[in-house]
Image: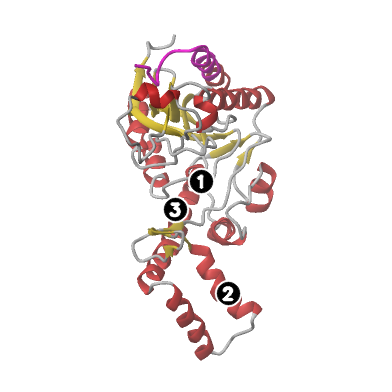
Amino acid sequence: MRYLTEASELTKQRLDIIQELQDLRGSEMICYVTGDRPTNANIPGMISQVSQEHLRFVYDHLDRLGEIDHLDLFIYTRGGDADVPWPMVNFIREFATKFSALVPYHCHSAGTLICLGADEILMGKGGTLSSVDPTTVNQFNPRDPLNPAIPLGISVEDVTAYITLAREVAKISEQDHIIDVFNELSKQVHPLALGNVYRQHTRIRMLATNLLKIHMRGEKNEAKVTQIVEIITEKLYTHTHFINRREARKVIGLNVRDPERKVEKLMWDLYQNYAADMQLYEPFDLNMFVGDETYKEGVAKGAFIESLEMMDVWGSVFAVSKNKAVPPNLPVPISPERIQALQGLPFKIDVNILKMGWERALREKQT
């Protein structure tokens, strides 16, 4: 059986990079990376997002480090659960006097919220943040017409934009007409789903405000905090707008710094190492993976939470079997061997998960 935490040359190189970054920065480092590998197969462990289950692993790493002067959180993620940033930032604040977020590439949605709780954000030339407008899903949401068992997600800002469209573009100003606009919306979306949208609308602004007050400690300018919250929750107009470091610093007003040249190179090298280990640049195609073989095992790594002394990896070990499909109306029984020998039969590919979950590797303390 293969292991997710098997030592490799990539692991060794990664530890060397982390050590060098810590030496240059005078900090301790925790790396938090969630995977977004493109795939056409539903293989658990290949893709992950910011999740509440990650909190206890981050806490374990912090507890192992103990109380420290400066923590660097190296982070790559496309987003996830918006309930995670607040407790994660507070965990970090319990252990570290200073907290910096290192963003070599994408750090979106919930990842951006985590950065708002840092004293400073170091962004490389390719670093990007995003808006933090959430999408809500509950049992009262409209159903996906292609799969009625699955509720559609509702973007909080899409609902508010609908009302804004009526007021500002269609120039509907009479109260009775605005009520008609809202009533039309409630015919398409269950009122309780809209109530949930409002709760999330309020919650995300409160969360961003509280995190920004940590990020901008010492500044009394409440108006600036309010302005930043408005920009990152509603005024970017699309969840796919990537905020570069110039925009984050000069337009939005975040405490973003350009890392020193050597630090920036190491940040990018570290991201590239994780990308190689998780195969983020290699789209997974089930047919191409198994090829002409009838059985092949693979490893999917979907998340890393790592420091010098400990590595937690989430993913799966899976097996792919490729066999010719048995014709449904065979007149006589036929052995599996003869079925495989028959020409012109379609192939059936099955995926079997051999192992899934978190694995931990402990290391000796670096000196």
Residue occupied by mark 2: 164
Q: Quadrant of the C terminus?
A: top left
Question: Mark 3 — residue?
Answer: 210
Question: Which of the marked residues, 1 or 2, is nearer the chain's N terminus?
Answer: 1
Query: Dot 1 lies on which element?
Result: helix
The crowding category of the residue bearing disc 3, from other C-alpha atoms within 10 Å (few below 14, some 14 to 19, many at least 20), is some
Q: Which disc number belongs to residue 205?
A: none
> Looking at the picture, which amino acid does disc 1 mark?
Leu
Q: Earlier in the sequence, mark 3 or mark 1?
A: 1
Look at the numbered discs 1 and 2 and tell me whether their residues touch, using CB distance below 8 Å: no
Q: Which residue is mark 1?
A: 116
Determine the CA span between mark 3 and mark 1. Answer: 9 Å
Instruction: Check if residue 12 falls in the magenta segment.
Output: yes
Of 314 and 215, which appears nearest the observer? 314
147 sits to left or right of 255: left
Residue visible at 46% across and 63% down in the picture: 145
Q: Which residues are magenta?
A: 1-18
Q: Is residue 188 or residue 214 the one in the foreground? A: 188
Q: Judge whether residue 195 can be spotted in this image.
A: yes
Q: Secondary structure at mark 2?
A: helix
Is 55 covered by the magenta stretch? no
Tags 3 and 2 touching, CB below 8 Å: no
User: 108 or 74, which lies in front?
Assistant: 108
The kind of residue on which mark 2 rests is: Thr
- Going by the numbered disc 3, the residue's amino acid type is Asn
Q: Where 181 falls versus 364 (above or below)? A: below
Q: Secondary structure at mark 3?
A: helix
Q: In the figure, 196 relative to 348: above or below?
A: below
Q: Is residue 308 left or right of residue 224?
A: left
